[in-house]
Image (cartoon, coloured by chain):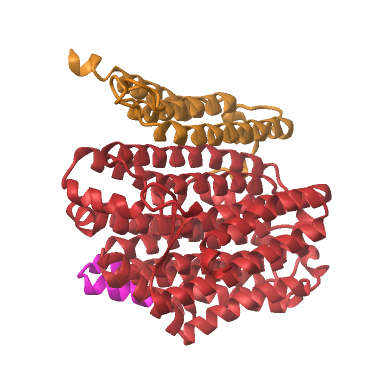
Chain colours: A orange, B red
Amino acid sequence: MDAFLGYYNYWIVIALMMTGLYTVAASGNLVKKIIGLNIFQTSVFLFFISVGKVSGGTAPILAEGWTRYSNPLPHVLILTAIVVGVATTAVGLALIVRVNRAYATIEDDEIRRSDLPDSS
Amino acid sequence: MIASHLPALQVVVPLVAAPVCVLLRWSRVAWMVAMAASLFAVGGAWCLLAGVLSAGPTSYFLGSWAAPWGIEYRVDETNAWVMLVVSVISAVSLLFARRSVEREVETDRIHLFYTAWLLCLAGLLGMAVTADAFNVFVFLEISSLSTYVLVSLGTRREALVAALRYLVLGTVGATFFLIGVGLLYQVTGTLNMGDLATRIAQLGPHRTVTAAFGFLAVGIAVKSAVYPLHTWLPNAYAFAPSAVSAFLAGTATKVSLYLLLRFLFTVFGHEFVAGGPVPVLLALTGVAAVVAASVAAVRQDDAKRLLGFSSVAQIGYLVLGVSLLTTEGVAASLIHLFGHALMKTALFVCLGAIVYRIGSARIDDMAGIAKRMPWTCAALVVGGLSLIGVPLTAGFVGKWYLVAAALEAGWWPVAAAMLLASLIAVAYVWKLVESAYFRAPSARVAAARGAPFSMVAAAWGLSGANIWFGIDTSLPIGVANRAAAALLGG
């Protein structure tokens, strides 16, 4: 039981990661693919944040009576990764807007059908 | 004073030049800014390479923060060489790009096109120069995001779909890379590559390290289009603007392959890699790539897609060289990496010039084009010969060393696959040549004129380099041997 509850944050990460990847692979709707990508990336953010947490540790600010501090570095890294994720989502959604204008659909299979000679 | 900051300037100059392009809003000036930044990067990379060859690797600490805590930029033979290739290809592609982009991109967006180009260049050079695993991820995403934008600017609507597919796959790949970096940080507490290498060696066999290696390898493999993960590449190259195809074909996958080398040999080390199933897996994907992608290339009707599949095959060659895990194999891969950048960019530039005149990249549409564009088509033939690996071209040198390294390691099936794929390459290069030289011109072709001088100059600059480095091989072989020795020894 402890193997499960003791690592519950990692189980959440894995569940989110699989949900995200499955959505990317299985969904035919381009917006849903981007949402899946977001869930996938978020799971990695959570993973990094879990890594930085030290049991019983406090925020890394010098204070009376504290000797254990959480590691701030993974949190800072993830701040950068979140920015990257937002940029990716923005570019992806902008592309979908253009795709919708050009094809009048955002369903993968309909796009494939209208471009048949070029898709293989 | 400036010279000591060169490693950082390689990244900073293109990165600062990018917003300058946005602010100036003038397409001609934006091109000049991009060209100036690329030429600066060429000069910088050359000075760095010369410095490394005479005085050994150098480290640069950003903001003067010492290595394991601050971000370190480390220049050695391998990445100085990769930076030189990337910046030269960027400069030559830009020479070609000026006229081509005026035709293919809307006028009020041209300055933004060059902004994305510069960001991509900054990202690629950053990936090469940095010695910090997380910093690699950031530069990887900078170059990838700008690449998606560049690909989507193609004239046909399929470009949008190709860019989006690339975005989805590329982001999954980059996120895998990030997971790998996270796992490594979790177990070692460091992000500096040199520091990682020492601590991984101290740890010995460790399940987290193995998992991290798996995530990193798959992430990098997506980015460098290693065979089963290559599906984004042919369409992205086929529908991107001609200049972008030329630029990406010579740079993006090459820098990712450099990352593969860096993580395999510098971070994880030869013993770790040799102990696992990695060499066999790499060899299998490599053989699959050279054979299957070459066959796929023969079946294409679109010349740019054909070259895209051929790129996947050539990446297979590079992976095969790496999979031998010998100094000879890695050196051969580095030589072929350089040769492939030259030949594939040359071919895409020639095709781009043809597309500029006839407005189509379909092989049937370019029937008889050699009579109208003799110089461009002659350069195309030279690039094609180099792609096949005919003696006296850069492609021959790379393949010769690859086959020799495979035979020396006793992997004769690998050598056989390489030779078979070269024969298939004859078939797909012949498809282009046959259409261009031995068919009656269509009405569309009859109206075409010779390509603009800047395009012919770019094409012949690259084709000439293919011949030059096929005859005088001292520079690439000398650098590659030293780089491989340093990678496997250190």
Residue A35 visible in the picture = yes
Instruction: Work out whether B475 lies above or below B134.
Output: below
Q: Among all residues in the image, which is located at the extreme bottom?
A: B471
The residue at the point 67 percent across, 71 percent down is B439
Residue B338 spot, x, y in % from top left:
47, 70
Residue B60 spot, x, y in % from top left:
46, 60
Could you tell me which quadrant the C terminus of chain B lies in? Answer: bottom left
- On screen, residue B327 versus residue B262, left or right, reads left
- The range drawn in magenta is B399-416
Would residue B415 be counted in the magenta stretch?
yes
Residue B274 figure quarter? bottom left
Instruction: Work out whether B104 lies above or below B177.
Output: below
- On screen, residue A8 versus residue B382, left or right, reads left
Would residue B103 be counted in the magenta stretch?
no
Residue A76 spot, x, y in % from top left:
46, 34
Residue B268 spot, x, y in % from top left:
27, 52
